[in-house]
Image (cartoon, rainbow, N blue to C red):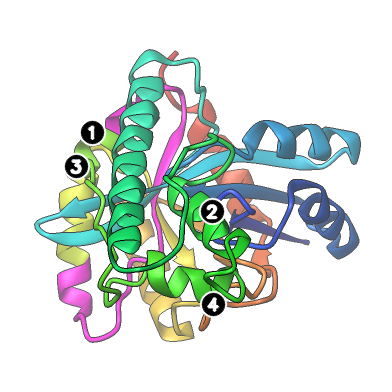
Amino acid sequence: MSVDLHIHTVASESLWTPRALAEEILREGLTAFAVTDHDTDAALDETAREAERLELNFVPGVEFSCQLDGVDVHILGYFLDRSCGPLDELLKRIETDLVEGATECSERMRAGGISLPPFRFAGKQHPYVELANSLVDSGEAADVRDAFGLVINPESRFFVRPMRPGPWEVIGAIRGSGGVSSLAHPVRRGVAMRTISQEISKLQAMGLQAIEAYSPHHSNECVRTLLELCRKRGLGVTGGSDNHKGLLRGRPDRLADVPDWVYEELLELRSGLPA
């Protein structure tokens, strides 16, 4: 049996609706799945209802965008209790920063001659995704993929880089909410494994609990290296497809085939947290 602990929905750069995703999980026969949208929990409640309807094991998560020594890193948070004060405050602050970024991006577009109404955040998706959808609705982009080329592409003249929280803050908020933190797809093209290992050491010192070893972004050799590193350092293992349902170029269009012991280990990590 398999699991997939890294999937995105329409709330963040994906074509999966919660219902369609849950039904696909059922068809694929996965043991468990997680929704980990970028910097938003907007789709978690609806996905949880769909998972309950179909009697699926669902893990609520968020993929937090952070910066470590000037480098973008993504921290996955699993089993988040969003009623927890520090986590709730962090999510609200991130949302505020993203809304400000989307608003500035929108104003740059309007000043650049793109016919677009003033940005008004509805709160149902990642703010940058809502802006991309407004470009499509206004006829200024052929589709969402085209719109993303203007909104989230760092090479776009309209792009506004949002503020990023520090990983120590994210890891602390995840742990404080009773959740488990994992470093998403740590291996990057052109970066030596020694450098990756050093980054992992810094994050583990901040309280990081796991590494996403299984990822389509990793070669088989990288997976083996990361699994060995996790065992040596006492870190847990997670894995997933980083699936966006074909919306983003170069991203997989298939759900993951991660062994189900990874889900069992995630459950153990969660149960081992202090009350």
The three-letter code of the residue at mark 3 reads: Gly
The reply to whether callout 1 and callout 3 are in contact (CB within 8 Å) is yes
Query: How would you rate the neighbour count of disc 1 (Cα within 10 Å): few for under 14, some for 14-19, many for 20 or more?
Result: some
Mark 4 vs mark 2, foreground winner is 2
Kindly report the distance in space between the C-alpha atoms of the residues bearing marks 1 and 3.
5 Å
Task: Report the residue at 46% width, 24% height from top.
Answer: 178
Q: Which residues are magenta?
A: 171-196
Quadrant of image for the C terminus: top left
- Quarter where residue 56 is shown: top right
Kindly report the distance in space between the C-alpha atoms of the residues bearing marks 4 and 3.
26 Å
Q: For residue 224: magenta?
A: no
The reply to whether callout 4 and callout 2 are in contact (CB within 8 Å) is no
Mark linked to residue 228: none
Task: Report the residue at 52% width, 76% height from top.
Answer: 146
Q: Earlier in the sequence, mark 4 or mark 2?
A: 2
Query: How would you rate the neighbour count of disc 4 (Cα within 10 Å): few for under 14, some for 14-19, many for 20 or more?
Result: some
Mark linked to residue 166: 3
The three-letter code of the residue at mark 1 reads: Glu
- Quarter where residue 251 is shown: bottom right
Q: Which residue is the site of mark 2? A: 12
Task: Report the residue at 51% width, 31% height from top.
Answer: 270
User: Can you see residue 195?
Assistant: yes
